Structures are given as C-alpha cells and as structure tokens.
Image (cartoon, grey):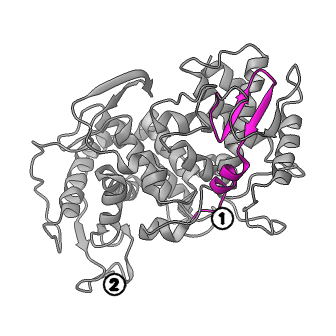
Amino acid sequence: MGTALCAVLVAACTTGIKGEIRTAGDIAGLPVTHFESGLKPDAPTPQLRVRNLSDSAEDRLAVAAIADVGDFWREQLPRHFGQPFEPVRSLLSYDPNGTEIEVCGASTRNSAMNAFYCPPEDLVGWDRGVLLPLLRERFGPMAVVTVLGHEFGHAVQYRLGDKAGIDENTSTIVKEQQADCFTGAYFRWMAEESSRYFRLSTSEGLNQVLASLFFIRDDPGVSATQQGAHGTAFDRTYAFQLGFESDAARCATIDQADVDARITEQPFDPNDTNQGDLRITADSVALLQRSLDESFAGASGDPPRIVEGGGSCPDGSGTPPASYCDDDNTVSIDLAALARIGQPIDREAEYTGGEAEGGLGDFAAFAEIVSRYVQGIQVDVGAEVNNANAGLRTACLVGAWASAIDVEGALLRPSPGDLDEAIAELLRPRSLIAADLDGHRVANGFARVESLRLGYYEGSAACTSTYP
C-alpha cells in the first residue's frame, strides 16, 4: 500500500480531460463518463459567512462545497425525513500555522490535517493550511468536497437525532459510517447533475473520492470499538458506495448491529508477530498455493501451478508480474517484482508527499497472483475470460477467496489492513486484480472496488451471477 500516491491511485493525477467521453457499462445505473471534475465555470458565488476566510483556492472550494451540500440537504431532509433544513450556525476556516483560534475546546494550532463538526457550537471547520492543500494537490478538487461533505453529514446527524438512531451512546464508528454513506448519497445527486456548483464524472471524479477515502483511513490494527475510529478504507468505501447506490434514508438505517455484522476494522491478533507484513518469497508463495488449492478444491480439473517464470508465459504473452498460461495450466510469476509490490506501505510518505520506499503491501501482491489463479479456475469451467465482465468477476473471486480464508486455523489469513492493500491495487490505472485474462481492465475504480466487496460479502456464487 505504499509508493507515492500519485503513482498508486489513479484519481490522484488525472487532469486535462476535455469534453465528455462515455464508455460501456454503468456506475450504479449512471453512465460511465470521463471529463474534468470540479467547480463549474459558471458556479454562483456562495453567500455564506465564514470566520477567518482567506482567498485561497482551498477556501473557495470549501465554501462552494458547504453551499452545495447545503442545497442537497435542503432537498433531502423534507423528502426523506419530513423536516426542514437548518444551516449550520458557524463556519470556520483556519491555518494551523497561522493565528491561534480557540474552537470547540481546543486550539487550531493542534488541529493540522483536520476537518470537523463541533456539535456544541454547531460549527463546521476545516484546515486550509495543511489538509485541504494536500488533498487538492494530491487527489484533485473532489477530495476536498468529499471531506467537507462528510463533516456536514455529522451536522445532519445532529439534526436528525432519533431519525438516524443517533444519541449520546452511539459509537463513533456508526456515526462515521453514516457520514460516509451520506457523502455517497450527496455525490450521487451531484453525478445526476443536480448541483449548481460542481460537475462529477463517474470515472475519474469518483476515483478522486475513493482515493481520498483511502488516504483518510485508519491505520491497520485500530479497533472499530475505539473512540474516534473512522474505519478502514474497505469499510469507508463500502459506506460511501452504499449511499451512492441508494439514498440518504438508507444511510440513516446504519446502526450498531449493521456495523458489527460487516465491519472489517479490528486489532492485530496477539499471535501475529509480523503485524500483518509477510515477505513475498518462494516459501510464502508455496503457502499461497496450498491455500488456493484448498479453497478451490471443489472445482473440477487440476488446479493451476504457480511457477517462477518471469511473470510471462513461454510464448511471451501474459500480464506480468503474474500471468495465467493456459497451455500448461500455470501461473507464471516474477517473484522479485511481486516482492517489491509486497513491501509495506510507507505511511509517512503518504502524508508528506515525499519519496516513498514501500510498496502496496503483501496482500496486494498475493491478490495479483490469486487473480491469475482464478483465471485458470474460470477457464476450466468454461467461463468467458475475455469479455467486459471478466475483470470484475476476477476481482470478485479474489474477494470471495479473502473472505473464505478469514477463519481460525487457515494456512493464510487476512490481517488488519489487508483489504485496504487490495483497494490500493484496485485504484491503480493498471490494476491486475481487476483484469481479464489478457490484462484488459474495467475503466473505473468504483466498479473495481465494488466487485471485490461483492465477493467478500456474498461469495463466489454472486460473482458468477453478477458478472456472467
């Protein structure tokens, strides 16, 4: 999960797209569109009072985002909850390196890399000096809108109260999952061209959103029961996609039982001496082979053999660093390249934008091998491995495998943060996890992540029926 995010996450560096291009398929019923997302050239000037406002690009984006999400909730609260919208009482922009401001019982000097909602003051605040510039420069303008939309979701929770099941005893993780889901519903409204302020493409624009949710994930090993837990990237993208695919009313039904049934955020097992980091070696790949053979023992025919063959097939074809070779039923891997991918994430480089020394994590490397192994399983049962659905079916089967081995006593078992490593790989422009036999990839990260999630929660049968 490491390397500089500009290289890892497709959304981070997508610029210069002119006009509107559509590709086959859909995103939750909407067409797949390609254009530059952000503020509309003719967007109105928001009429909002903001304390300590600057004329920076970040503040212009933030104020437009607050005005826009206010428009969204002005429609949604009466429609879904039967109550009028009430704007927040106070908005605050601050630079943690600038003038010190006391807000919500704390100093802005201690609030770098932060945006927040303060219930006692009914205030939404944002760090324009560190957090917002980092998000805008690294991921694009929609990352800023994502964070502000999320914080405004907390303000809506405060207004809904019992209608959202929120009270003083509600856990942090439930509140955060609801706010991420509300953000997804808001972005759906934007993608449907209801916004006066922003345009959002369902490919690169949504990728910016998913990239920012990946960035603001909790570190591996955090427990969902901890005060302040926000969720893994897998959990956060799940909630966002739920809102995008449904509506705000569905988001308000997220409760503790729902979260407990599916949340992946958990502490490290005391016996996990590697803290989730397993080196990609010949021995660990041999262990992966055994895990896969056990997991797919019910499939007909001989399982593919994983061999160190440079990552390509004998005839030169393939999808290095891992390829399924139909002629001899093998998965050829480039062990050295996969070992580099499997290096632990460089979290410090993520935050600073410096030169990264890490990779995507061990699970990302393993998942690339698994994606080629399941190509062999699909070929054996006569599935089409070169059509438009093949890449999504493959990612789905990787998710199904990850869920199936998450049991006590498994030869290999996912560690906290492993699913986030898979998401980091899925958001790369050249994702192998979501590629068909010849390496053709679905165009958008939203569908890639969604397919992994489907397999993880619903199993391999759902992969076949959803992606025939």
Disc 1/disc 2 C-alpha distance (Å):
28 Å
Label at residue 109:
2
Secondary structure at badge 2 equals: helix
Q: Residue 414 location, x and y as percent? A: 74, 52
Q: Which residue appears at 30% of the width and 68% of the height?
A: 126
Picture quadrant where residue 138 is located: bottom left
Q: Residue 118 location, x and y as percent? A: 36, 70
Query: How many numbered marks does the figure carry?
Result: 2
Packing grade of label 1 (10 A; few <14, some 14-19, many >=20) is many
Left or right for 167, reference 378: left
Q: Quadrant of the N terminus?
A: bottom right
Q: Which residue appears at 88% of the width and 42% of the height?
A: 290
Pointer 1 with pointer 2, Cβ within 8 A = no
Segment tinted magenta in the rendering = 317-345
Q: Which residue appears at 70% of the width and 15% of the height?
A: 383
- Tell which of 77 and 226 is nearer to you: 226
Query: Taking 178 as reference, is 299 above or below it?
Result: above
Q: Callout 1, which amino acid?
A: Ser
Query: Taking 245 as reference, is 405 above or below it?
Result: below
Q: Which residue is disc 1 drawn over?
A: 223
Secondary structure at badge 1 equals: loop
Q: Residue 117 location, x and y as percent? A: 36, 66
Q: Quadrant of the C terminus?
A: top right
Left or right for 296, reference 81: right
Residue 8: say if magenta.
no
Extreme front residue here? 315
Residue 328: say if magenta.
yes
